[in-house]
Image (spheres, rainbow, N blue to C red):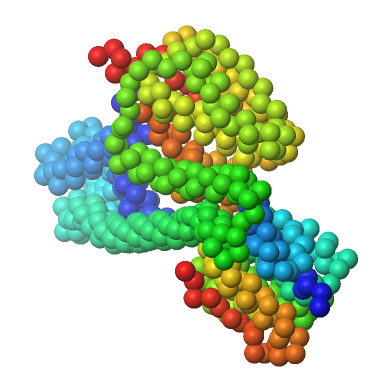
Amino acid sequence: MTMSTRRGAPPDPGLVLAQQRGYVPRLFQRLSLFHVHVARGRQAIAIACLCATVVQLVVFFVTPIANRFYSGWPRGWLIHLVAVLSAFVGGMWPGLVAEAVGITAIWTKGKYFTPMHPGLEVFALIGLLQIFIIHQLQLAHGAVIGRERALEIARRQADDARRAAQDANRLKDQFLATLSHEMRTPLTVILGYCGMARARGIHPDDHPSVMATIERQALTQLGVVEDLFEVQCLLHGESRLEWDKVNLEAATAAAVEELRGAAEEKKITVVVELAPVTVSGDPASVRQILRKLLSNALKFSPEGARVALSVAGRGDHAVIAIENSGRPIHPEFLPHLFEPFRQGDMSSTRPHGGLGLGLAIVKGLVDLHHGSIEVHSDDTRTCFTVTLPQRTPQQES
Amino acid sequence: MSSARILLVEDHPDTLQLYRTYLALAGFDVTAASNATEALRHLASARFDAISTDLAMPGMDGVEFVRRIRESIQPAVPIIVITGQVRPRTLIQQGLDCCGVLVKPCDLEQVVELLRFLVRECPRRCDVCRHLVSPGS
């Protein structure tokens, strides 16, 4: 079992890269089973090979001495057999050659050379050096590769950081441009009517509608300012929640009533399905969650569409679902949906205004209530589902 | 003398209502459109003495709208742009071919003066009035 887990262990990436790129001569790699196993991450087998190699080296150096005492069958040959096998397993090919020479010497009874021939010691030395040389080569190249990899990783990290900074900067510029536009629009109307009253006069019959327009635009601007403040608080983790019992049924009905005008303007039918559910939370924030989600649904629904809003109890949670038809949310934008300062369409031809803060605020408030929010969007409908616990840690403590 | 015909294009309903009322009070004959497509329909059936347009609008933006008018519909008509975007000079450098750019919120008396000037002077001395840019507010 241990072996199988070891086999699964990742090999040294520098070494693997060295092999893949041919930095370490492949012939050398194959010559040594030890290094083959190291490269493949089989540490135990590699260590076994190393042991076998050491045995072979010891046997090899001992052989000439051994031959002096056990030059005949079977003991001398047994030693040679062990040496040959361990040399094979350890991948000590020069050692094998030395063994071959030694065996031949014994076999020919020293006719051509003796088992104690000085050349054999050279072979043995080469065998010893083999591991050392290959290892050094691999270490050296591994180090080179390691440095290259480290550089590559650092470069990639720097690129990522730069790109993130550029993205953030672009987002900031876009947001400031949008903010400027969103602040200017109501001001245009308010200051426009002021100028008109001063320079041209406003007909008394028009006073009520002009006052209503000015008030509407001032409230729009107030909404922008409040959203900015809210998102600032949420981003800095400042909770301004005052915990109480919130009747979701009443809060939802109030939100629907509040946005009735906006719905009627686009001839949208709001279908409401309410259950008597109470959650623990900040009443103003819960109302804000409901209001923002509903106004979002109305904003992105086409004229004459239908928006469905339901509140239900599920176990110890309350589930609020708001569904609208209309164009689906772009799949690429979905992951950024709840991020502040982002909008699906930031072009000059976007059909809807706004700062791109609404859903970020909703998400932040839902999080503060220990709840969750999910979105599902396909070709036919978009549905936001908010789950709020009926009892929260604040309430229990 | 009959009053000058102005085509007003603005997607924000309250702003459109304000401009329409103001320009009508100033004596212009105003035709209002809430987007560029609707404005192009008006342009197909009537000639205007001047056009005032917003830039950021759903469907077709003001830059494309101005390009289309200049290309074929009424190439010599004076056009002013009233926009919430804050870099009017950049827009003109990028080829927005209009007679003037005003940044919201602008003094509507200034718009009236500019439109009167353009209606009076532009057909004769177009090079003089081109590319007037309000300094912004």
Tell me, yes or no, if residue A282 can be seen here. yes
> Residue A149, percent across and down?
33, 57
Nearer to me, A254 or A21: A254
Tell me what residue is drawn at x 38 percent, y 54 percent. Answer: A17
Tell me what residue is drawn at x 45 percent, y 58 percent. Answer: A176
> Residue A37, percent across and down?
33, 42
> Residue A84, percent across and down?
29, 41
Q: Quadrant of the C terminus of chain A?
A: top left
Q: Quadrant of the N terminus of chain A?
A: top left
Tell me, yes or no, if residue A83 can be seen here. no
Left or right, B40 with respect to A316, comes to right
Residue A106 drawn above or below residue B101: above
Residue A77 drawn above or below residue A385: below
Nearer to me, A356 or A57: A356
Left or right, A250 with respect to A131, comes to right
Nearer to me, B83 or A107: B83
